[in-house]
Structures are given as structure tokens and as C-alpha cells.
Amino acid sequence: MITLQKKKRYILSILSGILLSISFPFTGSLTFVIFVALVPLLFLENYILIKRFKSIKVFIHSYITFFTYNAITTWWIWNASPGGALLAIILNSLLMTVAFYCFHLTKKYIGNKEGYISLLIYWIGFEYFHYNWEASWTWLTLGNTFSITPSFIQWYSFTGVLGGSFWVLLVNLIVYRIYQNVYFKNERWKIQTPLFYTAAFFILVPIGISLISYYSYIDKGNTIEVIAIQPNIDPYNDKFEPGMLDKQLEKISNLANQKITNKTALIVAPETAISASFFEKEIQRLPFFKHLLNQKSKLNNVPWYIGASTMQIFEKKNSRASMKLKGGPGYIEYYNSSLLIRRDNSTEFAHKSKLVPGVEVIPFSEYLSFLEELSIDNGGTSGTLGIEKEPKTFDTKHFKFAPVICYESIYGEWVAEQCRKGAQLICIATNDGWWKDTPGYKQHNSFASLRAIENRRNVVRSANTGTSCFINQRGDISQATNWWETDVISEEVNLNTQQTFYTKYGNVMGRSFAFFSLLLLLFTFVRRFKHIYISQSK
């Protein structure tokens, strides 16, 4: 076995981080590199174990790997919030490191075979857990790597994105086994041929099955015509300026007028297109709304789905987002909302519920209220926003669709529940201008393809700027708009009512692995304490 000097060990740590990064969409987009990206780190972990170095070295080296990965792929958060970028990169790297470190401990105290199996269990369990707590930042879920290759992952309609993460880990373990046999067991490369065939099998068979599904699949459901608007309003300098709302709404209406036809069934406008905060109960008598209805009447009274900043007053504290009114009784809550204006001008609101940590929600402030003071100003509001108790759908009286606001589009199980409740179409309203011209908005757009595949639903995406587009039920993107350009697009999309396995049952793999990871971790610590007790007894 070769000897690794300290410098070489750090190089291996960084190498794994770089390989993970260049495989990720728009920070390299070398997708197939993901299948070997973790091999240097696995090699290093085993070297540390065999040399009987302290386990803390595994923690340090894996943190270097995941910090490199997070920094290279999500540095663009800095454009919206330097503090938020640092927290996201530092803390997300830490969580990934903890998952990898748990694998090392299980391998150390239970056994090699059990250890490598535990990596699959711990990592999938970690990713599932990360989707379901307040400090959630799931951008770098390993399965997201394939968002730019939808033809390879049509089976996400069964497993969801965590199936892709499992695929990545499994192939990395097989490839690593080859290197382990050569460098740790001194076996010849020639006799590793069966393992090469095994790795090829587990890469090519899922892709082959997916390609058959991809080329044979035909979008299901009746078609309707939808318009998606990209007004391209600067979120830093113009969007939230006082007195600009009517001009911005008029711009949106004029864009819609360029594509309106007698077949148009829905107009989709971006997140916070109605940028001035207003009380939801008063909407029908507000001047801007009357102006909007006037524009709507010129557009055949087609229903609108549009983003808004809204408020509600409560006599008593309604939720953790409720803030005491200054100078009077009662509480106020702020929302990042979506608004449906039906053909008859009746309205319905849905509040964004998957909130951006540090911007729209202050994690754990329910228990540590002083943390609210650390919140980042986001277009005039700050602190924790109000949310829906459960996913909602909008009903235009002719079809149902899922109102998805920005960050919510990376939560597969959330969108699947909307489809389970009858949504025939997914409509995403977002404002990706905060990140400027970086990989961020491109990655965000590509993740929408995963939601299309998981649920076999067409997706309509309206971005303030960034990328507005349409996505079919196979995950193919069409009519993608350019960055920092005013544009409007229209397309006939399908309204599918059939439910996939993932839509019906949600994240079965994630729930199962999360449960088993807790049991496995408990068993590992029992063995660890038993090992310590025996060592001390001697």
C-alpha cells in the first residue's frame, strides 16, 4: 500500500470537492464525473482507518471536500446576501460532513461491509431530513446533478430525486472497490474486470431503461394555451420603488397582449410582480387591483396567476410569524404570496411555505426569538414570513394547477402533494434576479425539469428575469428566455390527471432510509461505547 503524506491527503480532499463541483449543472456540467467524484474521499477515509489515525482526520478531510463542493457550486448566493452565503456554505458543508463521518464510525465499529452499506443509508437519510427541517438548503442534493440530462432519469417518476443520489453513491462505491483492491490489497488491475462490468451495468442499465421510457413517452392530457411573462425588472433598484407598481403591472399587461389569443387559458406572471404589500381582505377595493382588472378585461378576462407581497391582521397571535402591531391591539403577518384572479375576478391566495433560511424564515426563532433581529431585508419585509399549513392548489373552474413560488420548486415531495391534490399543471413564479448572471438561476431553472418527471406534469415557469420557459412531462425545456431580457412566451401545455408512483406515495426511499439511519446510528454508538469499555478494561 502506498504512503500518503499530509499534503497528498489534503489534495485528495480538495480533488473530491472539485470533481463534485464540475459534475454539477452549470459549474462544469460534466455530469458523468459524479460517478467517480467521491472515490478520492473514500480512498482517503479507508487510508486513515487502516493507518489507525484518529477519526477526527476523517471529519476534517471530508469537511474540506464538502466545503469545496459548496463554495464552487453556490458562491453566487453572495450576490443576494454575503452573510447568507457564508452560513449556507459553512453549515451545509458541516451537515454533509456529519453524514459521511457517521458512515466512517459505523465502518470502524461494526465492519467494512456494514460500513459501506451504511453510507447509502446515512446519506439518503440525511438528504431526506434536510428537506424537512427549518434550516433546509437542499440545492446540492446529489440527485439534482442530473437535472440537465432528463433523458437519463425518467425513473425519477418512481424514486424522486433521492433515487439519483442513491445511484451516485452506489456507483462510486463500486468504482472505489476497484481502487481499494489494487492499492490496499495489492491485487492486479486485470482481475478487477468483473467490477468494471458491474460498474458499467449499474450506470448503463438505468440509463437504458430511462431512454426507452423517454423516447416512448407521450405527454398526457388535454391541452390549453398558457402565457408566461418575463418583465425583467431590476429587483435591486426598480422593483420595490414606491410609485412604480402601476407602471410595472402595465408592462406585464402589455407583454401579455402580445401573445393573447382566443385559446389562452392562463397568464402566469412572476414572484412579487405585485411588489407593494397590501392587506388581502382589501384587494377588491385597492386602486392597483382596479387598474389590473381593467387591463385583464382587455385580455379576454383570462385568469391570472401572479406573485404578490401580502399581509393579514389577526386579533390573536396566529403563528410564529405573527408580529405585535405597533400602536394598537392585534398582530400582523407578512407573506410571499401567489394570487389567482379568475375569469369572474374572484381571487384566491396561496402563501409561500418553503421559505429561504435567513431571508424569509429565521430557523429556530420560535424557540430563540432574538434570532429574528438577524434577519435579512428582502424587498421591504424582514423576519419570518407566514406560511400555509399544507400544500394548496388553485382551481380556475376549468382546471387545477400547483402554485409554486420560487424556492418551493426544489422540494419534490411538496410539489408531489399538490399534484396528489389534483393539480394537472405546475406553475412556477420566481424572481431569480437577486443572484445576477451566475449559475444560480440556471441551476434553479433546471431543477424544475425534475418536478416535471417526478409527477409527469407540464411546467410553466415565469421568472422576473433569469429563465422563463415551458417544460414537458419528460423534463424537456422549450422556449427558454435569456437573462436580463424582457420577454413573453406562449405554448400549448397538457393537463395530466394521472398520478405517478412518486406522486401517490411520495418519498418512500427517503422516509425508509431516514428511519433505518437512526437505528443504525444508535447501534453504532452502542458498539463504540462497548469498544471503549473493553479497551479500558484491558
Image: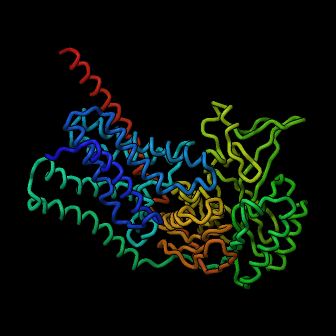
Closest to the observer, 71 or 428: 71
Residue 64 vertical placement versus 306 (above, below): above
Near-viewer residue (32 or 265): 32
Q: Residue at x 68, y 32 (%)?
A: 369
Q: Position of residue 23 (x, y in %)?
A: 39, 62
Q: Could you tell me residue 504's position as x and y percent?
A: 48, 58
Quadrant hosting residue 497: bottom right
Q: Residue at x 57, y 59 (%)?
A: 409
Looking at this view, is 382 or 338 the one in front? 382
Residue occupying the far top of the picture: 537
Vertical placement of 168 versus 67: above or below?
below
- Structure colour scheme: rainbow
- Above or below 376: residue 431: below
Where is residue 316? Give x, y as percent. 80, 35
Residue 299 is left or right of residue 165, and the answer is right
Instruction: Report which quarter residue 100 is drawn in.
Output: top left
Query: Quick one: quadrant of the C terminus?
Result: top left
